Image: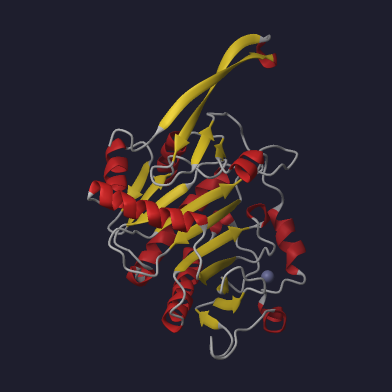
């Protein structure tokens, strides 16, 4: 397992204008994800992200004409045909599930999480998030049972516009379809390959190694294993979570989603202390109970690195398919551990 976490360190020499043009070496790391081929470049920068914009103002200005607010919801959102979802939508607690009007998969459910228009990252109610995950599961399982052709599913979240959301009102997206995303395909292929080569599950080895190293390991309980990703997708390190006892969506009990939401909302609180107010999240589920697979999730903070409001997606990620990260995952892990304790 010596090369489980593959990386190399390199550097560039510069004459620094902020230090009398003295010559300095700036080092960076290249890291490969332990399972898939995705890589990332990481710089240990001291950058502080710009102040959070006025979120109250965003909440007020986006509320007018919001199609997800209860007053307008019935007339402005799409409904499912009766044979798919009787009644046209699903409800659980305060969560309300409708079809995405621009679906990129055979079934895409939008889960409006609350009647409340704006839920702040710093005080996001974990029970609201839990209900959204449970309603996503109800929707996904229903469609898997109804349609024998669908093989792939996931629960996703673009929280606020920097993460790609066009609607401020908090909502998840449950996706069910025939074709996998490149990420899903590679994870399924690679973890099967790993199982054949090592006679052991990748996920079990991953947990064992991260637990022993204690470099990126945040916490664990009976069901969930929380780490900071070794090779992040985002400019700020991702949180990577393994559902230890779940091989498919059918294995996830409500209690597990409750614990997941409880701890995820703590992480969201931590992110806000770093001036981060937006993120993407995916829970990568499986339709089949394959022994080697584990349900897992990634929460990727989205940042605007400089005052000018630039995107955190640049040519590196967009055109070269490589992650670019401004903080060391190991340092962020110890910060999170201090914050939650
Ligand atoms: Zn709204």
Residue reaching furthest to the left: 199
The image quadrant where one finds ligand 1 is bottom right
Q: Position of residue 141 (x, y in %)?
A: 42, 77
Q: Residue at x 77, y 62 (%)?
A: 61
Judge whether residue 166 can be spotted in this image.
Answer: yes
Quadrant of residue 309 in the image? top right
The vertical placement of 78 against 294, above or below, is: below
Q: Is residue 150 left or right of residue 259?
A: right
Q: Position of residue 100 (x, y in %)?
A: 63, 73
Judge whether residue 202 can be spotted in this image.
Answer: no
The vertical placement of 83 against 248, above or below, is: below
Q: Residue at x 68, y 65 (%)?
A: 167
Q: Position of residue 166 (x, y in %)?
A: 69, 62
Quadrant of residue 138 in the image? bottom left
Q: Position of residue 44 (x, y in %)?
A: 52, 29
Quadrant where the image shows the C terminus: top left
Q: Residue at x 57, y 78 (%)?
A: 96
Q: Residue at x 47, y 63 (%)?
A: 126
Quadrant of residue 55 in the image? bottom right
Q: Nearer the viewer, residue 115 or 220?
A: 220
The vertical placement of 109 against 318, above or below, is: below
């Amino acid at each position: 397992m010596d090369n489980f976490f593959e990386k190399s360190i390199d550097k560039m020499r510069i004459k620094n204008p902020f230090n009398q043009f003295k010559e300095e070496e700036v080092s960076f790391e290249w890291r490969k994800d332990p399972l898939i081929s995705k890589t990332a470049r990481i710089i240990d920068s001291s950058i502080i992200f710009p102040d959070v914009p006025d979120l109250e103002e965003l909440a007020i200005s986006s509320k007018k004409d919001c199609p997800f607010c209860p007053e307008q919801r019935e007339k402005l959102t799409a409904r499912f045909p009766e044979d798919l979802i009787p009644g046209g939508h699903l409800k659980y607690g305060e969560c309300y599930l409708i079809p995405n009007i621009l679906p990129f998969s055979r079934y895409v459910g939008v889960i409006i999480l609350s009647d409340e228009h704006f839920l702040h990252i710093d005080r996001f109610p974990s029970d609201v998030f839990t209900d959204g995950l449970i309603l996503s599961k109800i929707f996904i399982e229903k469609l898997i049972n109804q349609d024998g052709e669908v093989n792939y599913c996931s629960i996703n979240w673009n929280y606020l516009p920097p993460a790609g959301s066009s609607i401020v009102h908090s909502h998840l997206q449950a996706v069910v379809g025939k074709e996998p995303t490149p990420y899903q395909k590679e994870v399924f292929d690679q973890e099967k390959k790993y199982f054949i080569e090592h006679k052991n599950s990748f996920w079990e080895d991953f947990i064992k190694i991260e637990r022993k190293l204690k470099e990126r390991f945040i916490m664990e309980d009976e069901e969930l294993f929380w780490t900071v990703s070794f090779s992040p997708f985002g400019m700020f390190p991702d949180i990577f979570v393994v559902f230890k006892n779940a091989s498919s969506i059918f294995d996830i009990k409500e209690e597990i989603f409750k614990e997941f939401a409880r701890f995820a909302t703590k992480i969201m609180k931590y992110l806000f202390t770093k001036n981060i107010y937006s993120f993407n999240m995916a829970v990568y589920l499986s339709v089949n109970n394959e022994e080697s697979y584990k349900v897992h999730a990634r929460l990727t903070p989205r940042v605007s690195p400089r005052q000018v409001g630039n995107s955190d997606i640049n040519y590196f990620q967009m055109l070269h398919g490589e992650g670019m990260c401004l903080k060391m995952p190991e340092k962020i892990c110890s910060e999170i551990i201090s914050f939650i304790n």
